[in-house]
């Protein structure tokens, strides 16, 4: 049955409409979980607030289980679902830059727009920095083109690399996530901070 | 007392609830074997389109040419019984009897995207069955020898000589078939331009025997 767009069951316009509605839902969840405060995201690095970890891991395991069950019921063909290509060096480099930006700015791109929508000045500053970064990357592209395209590994899935079935790997991720929630709760009690 | 219970409820419940809900789901998904619910890569209408286009058929001449050229992509699959295979087979053919088509010993041979799987049987019926199943399983490069061995015998092993008034193409075709017949050790043909020695290419049929027994159910 799915993916809906690949099988042309819905048009591109319907796709945009659905994306718009889901985007609003995503923004709403971010804002109501308190992500529009930069202290929330920074908190994960100092241990006093682990909401980021909880929200995103809950989202990840929900989506993961949902997709696997959809595939089991033959509602979606996972072979047709887009998997990010892996360019090892740019993945590591991008991860480091992104992580540093998280700690310094207290936002990720999504939450910065969330903060901006309720008028947070630091969110606006963050978005400004984000655009400077985009500009630098695109204008200086010839300089890091080689690095950007190096070590192309195809479209690997961790489960395939480890030689496990998707289901067993998913179960492992669930256990790890629940374990992390437990550690996060412990850390929040250990390094308490007043809520802003 | 009630306060502490409430407090415990407040701090413990979401995580335990989540765990109670999500761990069984995870166990189910871990226990279900992958890809068993939809082993077929082509749905019925896609397969029908493939089957009706008849693009799977390769002519006897094309195959004979590939055998003589020693085409490395060629992989002839004989789907008849081992007895029939021993009596006669095409050069280099591998015997995969139709009932054993899905046995794991043959899956490496059939499921690859390097060689062309060319199925043949006496007619086209069994070869077509093999083609249909492998195609539906998503194996690539599956073909069927058009007309099967019967037509092979008719056209390659014992080509009928065209009348002298036939068009040039017919005569060229006959010459090719005659040559192929000789190269492949076929039946007797009257040579138009006598003097060519009967070249026999020594070919050894490959018998791929199923080594392991099929798994008979169990746990």
Image (cartoon, coloured by chain):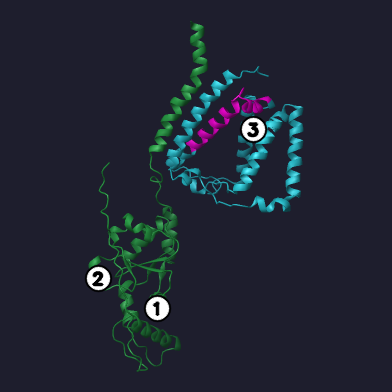
Numbered tag placed on residue B68 in the rendering: 1
- Shade of chain A as shown in the rendered figure: cyan
Q: Position of residue A68 (x, y in %)?
A: 46, 39
In the image, residue B150 above or below residue A26: below
Q: Where is residue B112 in the image (x, y as percent from the top left)?
A: 42, 60
Both on one chain, marks 3 and 1?
no
Residue that badge 2 annotates:
B86
Q: Mark 2 or mark 1: which comes first in sequence? A: 1
Task: Please give the name of the residue rendered at 38% of the width and 39% of the height, measured from the top-left corner.
Answer: B32
Q: Distance between the residues labelled 2 and 3?
A: 69 Å
Badges 3 and 1: C-beta atoms under 8 Å apart?
no
Secondary structure mostly seen in the magenta stretch: helix
Q: The green chain is which one?
A: B
In the image, residue A164 above or below residue A184: below
Q: Mark 1 lies on which chain?
A: B
| Highlighted magenta segment, given as a residue range | A39-66
Q: In which quarter of the image is residue B63?
A: bottom left
Q: Which of A145 and A25 is in front in this view?
A: A145
Q: Where is residue A28 in the image (x, y as percent from the top left)?
A: 63, 28
Furthest toward the left, the residue is: B83
Question: Is residue A96 among what the camera can see?
Answer: yes
Badges 2 and 1: C-beta atoms under 8 Å apart?
no
Q: Quadrant of the C terminus of chain A?
A: top right
Task: Please give the name of the residue rendered at 42% of the width and 37% of the height, measured from the top-left corner.
Answer: B29
Numbered tag placed on residue B123 in the rendering: none
Mark 3 residue element: helix
Question: Is residue A37 among what the camera can see?
Answer: no
**Callout in the foreground (2, 3):** 2
Numbered tag placed on residue A24 in the rendering: 3
Q: How far apart are marks 2 and 1 (CA)?
A: 21 Å
């Amino acid at each position: 049955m799915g993916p809906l767009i690949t099988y042309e069951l819905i048009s591109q316009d319907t796709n945009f409409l659905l994306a718009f509605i889901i985007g609003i839902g995503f923004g709403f969840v971010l804002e109501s979980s308190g992500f529009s405060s930069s202290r929330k995201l920074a908190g994960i690095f100092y241990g006093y607030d682990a909401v980021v970890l909880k929200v995103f891991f809950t989202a990840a395991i929900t989506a993961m289980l949902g997709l696997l069950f959809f595939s089991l019921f033959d509602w979606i063909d996972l072979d047709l679902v887009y998997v990010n290509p892996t360019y090892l060096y740019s993945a590591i480099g991008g991860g480091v830059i992104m992580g540093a930006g998280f700690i310094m700015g207290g936002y990720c791109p999504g939450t910065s727009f969330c903060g901006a929508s309720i008028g947070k000045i630091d969110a606006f500053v963050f978005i400004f920095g984000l655009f400077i970064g985009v500009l630098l990357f695109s204008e200086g592209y010839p300089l890091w083109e080689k690095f950007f395209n190096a070590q192309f590994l195809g479209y690997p899935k961790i489960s395939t690399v480890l030689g496990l079935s998707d289901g067993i790997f998913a179960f492992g991720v669930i256990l790890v996530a629940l374990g992390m929630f437990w550690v996060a709760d412990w850390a929040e009690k250990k390094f308490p901070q007043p809520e802003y | 007392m009630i306060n502490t219970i409430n407090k415990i409820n407040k701090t413990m419940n979401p995580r335990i609830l989540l765990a109670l809900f999500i761990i069984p789901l995870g166990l189910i998904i871990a226990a279900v074997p992958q890809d068993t619910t939809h082993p077929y890569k082509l749905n019925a209408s896609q397969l029908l389109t493939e089957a009706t286009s008849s693009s799977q058929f390769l002519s006897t001449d094309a195959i004979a040419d590939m055998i003589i050229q020693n085409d490395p992509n060629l992989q002839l699959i004989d789907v008849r019984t081992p007895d029939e295979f021993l009596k006669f087979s095409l050069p280099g053919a591998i015997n995969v009897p139709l009932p054993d088509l899905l046995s794991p010993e043959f899956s490496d041979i059939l499921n690859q995207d390097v060689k062309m799987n060319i199925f043949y049987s006496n007619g086209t019926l069994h070869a077509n069955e093999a083609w249909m199943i492998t195609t539906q399983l998503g194996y690539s490069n599956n073909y069927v020898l058009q007309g099967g061995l019967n037509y092979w015998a008719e056209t390659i092993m014992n080509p009928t000589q065209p009348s002298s008034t036939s068009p040039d193409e017919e005569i060229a075709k006959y010459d090719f078939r005659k040559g192929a017949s000789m190269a492949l050790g076929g039946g007797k043909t009257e040579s138009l331009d006598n003097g060519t020695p009967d070249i026999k290419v020594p070919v050894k049929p490959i018998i791929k025997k199923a080594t392991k027994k099929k798994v008979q159910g169990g746990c």
